[in-house]
């Protein structure tokens, strides 16, 4: 799902399906897990890589800094990202 913010088009993390895709976090929308996710390094400006999804699509695995994290799609929906090229 594309979201326009500040004149730019962004995506929510749950829409990134291609394994190996690298993205940069733009913002985290309000949720019950926002503070917990931020304490684990999911803060604006952080670069992450989508590693894989479970066979049924949920959860998804991402690489954040130096560790891997499994994230439910409903939580990934609250993370606004932009694709980056490396």
Image (cartoon, rainbow, N blue to C red):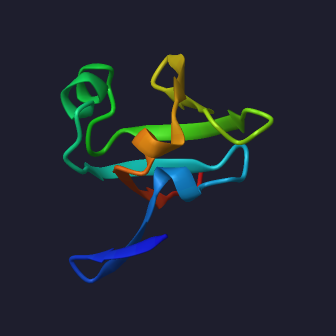
Residue visible at 80% across and 35% down?
55
Q: Residue at x 64, y 49 (%)?
A: 21
Image-based side of 5 in relation to 69, left or right: left
Q: Position of residue 86 (x, y in %)?
A: 59, 50
Q: Can you say whether 58 is above or below 12 in the image? A: above
Residue 55 appears left or right of 66: right
Can you give x and y, in whole percent of width and height, for residue 64 in the image? 47, 27
Residue 16: horizontal and vertical position, in percent? 60, 55
Q: Is residue 14 above or below residue 39?
A: below
Q: Quadrant of residue 4?
A: bottom left
Residue at 27% from the left image edge and 37% from the top image edge: 43
Left or right of 55? Residue 21 is left
Horizontal side of 50 relative to 23 (left or right) equals right
Q: How many marks?
A: 0
What residue is rendered at 49% in x and 38% in y? 48
Specify the farthest residue to the bottom: 7
Q: Position of residue 72 (x, y in %)?
A: 51, 34
Q: Quadrant of residue 65?
A: top left
Outermost residue toward the right in this view:
55
Residue furthest toward the top? 67
Relative to 78, does residue 48 appear above or below in the rendering? above
């Amino acid at each position: 799902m594309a979201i326009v913010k500040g004149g730019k088009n962004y995506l929510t993390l749950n829409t990134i399906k291609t394994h190996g895709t690298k993205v940069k976090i733009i913002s985290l929308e309000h949720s019950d897990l926002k503070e917990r996710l931020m304490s684990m390094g999911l803060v604006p400006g952080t670069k992450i890589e989508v590693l894989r999804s479970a066979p049924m699509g949920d959860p998804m695995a991402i690489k954040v800094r130096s560790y891997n994290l499994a994230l439910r799609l409903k939580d990934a929906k609250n993370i606004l990202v932009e694709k980056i090229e490396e």
